[in-house]
Image: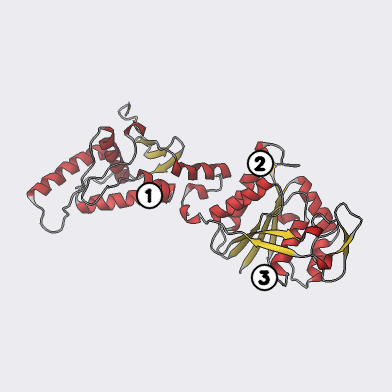
Amino acid sequence: MQKNILFLVTGMTPQIITETLYALAVDPENSDRWMPSEIHVLTTVKGKIQIRSRLFNDGIFEQFLKDFHLSDVKFDDSTVHVISHDGEELEDLKTLDDNELAANETCRLIKLFTEDTNSTLHVSIAGGRKTMGFYAGYALSLYGRAQDSMSHVLVSEEFEFAEGFYYPTPYEHYVAKYKSQERLNAQNAKLFLADIPFVRLRNTLPSTHPLNMNNYQFSDVIEQLNQVNQALSLEINVTHRYIQINGSIKAELPPREMALLMWFADYKINGKPGLKAPTGSHKGEISPAEQDYICELTEEYLIQYDELKDSDTNIVVTKDFFESTKSKLKKHLERQLGNELTARIMPKQNGRSTPFYLPIDKDQIFIINNFKDRMV
């Protein structure tokens, strides 16, 4: 069943909710009307009090649905989310820590809403503090899909801050102009829905990427994505069979792939120009010179593999083995680190038939091996 979700961040102005809903689902000027089946709002304790008091208790939201003959929309206390810390709901956003909590919760909710393949998400950044709107837009950029969208709703100038105005009514309804004795007819109000295009980065976060884990916070997401544009250090932990980027981002590797990466790291640390891939395979004829080279490569590889060895003892570093293991290494890294970060640590060539090398400075490569109590 298709689910349409409207997500908003609000503060002390709950009218943003009805104004946005009008612009999306009712406004005759909107040729692409869209009706949510659920409305979710992220706010503070003070914001929730305003929503309850005005939209729920005063019946404004119910009246909105009746005025425009709309079907029921799920919007109640269960879909009003309050930013909290250690189980305590925040009254307001006052500190840097409060803003970080808002960012984390915004990211968590948008990630949650976009996990359902049968859902469409529309995010409004019209309400709340500017930082909350920014976080909502940023989170949608991280997790938004092709069917998701974002907007900001604007109201005609004379109705800005008008007391008692929540949406353009289909009948005469007078409200007080802000800081004025003048009365305005809400029926004449105009709303403008500004669609906001955004860059979709979701494909840079594979489904098995650690950033898709529920325990990752907004700050973690930003930090890991920013690693793509920073200088990198690579730690290869032989004992526990994982690598670590910049001392924080881990990826586990099987023995074969770990040994291949260690082999390239050893070449780089020792100042060798790179490793020329074998050209022979098990199929067809291999020249004596190529056979000698394959034997040499096999011996070098097995030095690295020996510390990680499992039941596999019949390894010969032919062209097929080299290309297959390198390809699997790339896949393992992409699943755990993402495409961009993987590209910065995968062995590469400067051109066809040139040696492969590790594109990291040798002073930033560390091999930890407790078996031999050594660090290189």
Please, is residue 109 above or below residue 258 in the view? below
Point out the tag, 3 or 1, that comes first from the N-terminus: 3
Report which residue position mark 2 lands on: 99
* Quarter that holds the C terminus: top left
Report which residue position mark 1 lands on: 332
Give the label, 3 or 1, closer to the camera: 3
Where residue 55 sits: x, y (%)? 81, 58
Pointer 2: residues within 10 angstroms few (<14), some, or many (20+)?
some
Residue 250 shows in the view: yes
Check disc 1 and give the amino acid type: His
Assess whether mark 2 and mark 3 are in contact (beta carbons under 8 angstroms).
no
Pointer 1: residues within 10 angstroms few (<14), some, or many (20+)?
some
Where residue 133 sits: x, y (%)? 66, 50
Please, is residue 294 above or below residue 35 in the view? above
Residue 75 shows in the view: no
Check disc 3 and give the amino acid type: Arg
Where residue 172 sits: x, y (%)? 87, 69
Residue farthest left in this picture: 288
* Quarter that holds the N terminus: bottom right
Residues 11 and 1: in front is 11
Alpha carbon of mark 1 to alpha carbon of mark 2: how far?
35 Å
Q: Could you say which quadrant of the image residue 302 lies in?
A: top left
Alpha carbon of mark 3 to alpha carbon of mark 2: how far?
33 Å
Q: What residue is shown at x 70% (from left), y 68% (from top)?
A: 25
Report which residue position mark 3 lands on: 33
Please, is residue 323 above or below residue 19 in the view? above
Point out the tag, 1 or 2, that comes first from the N-terminus: 2
Q: What residue is shown at x 80% (from left), y 60% (from top)?
A: 166
Assess whether mark 2 and mark 1 are in contact (beta carbons under 8 angstroms).
no
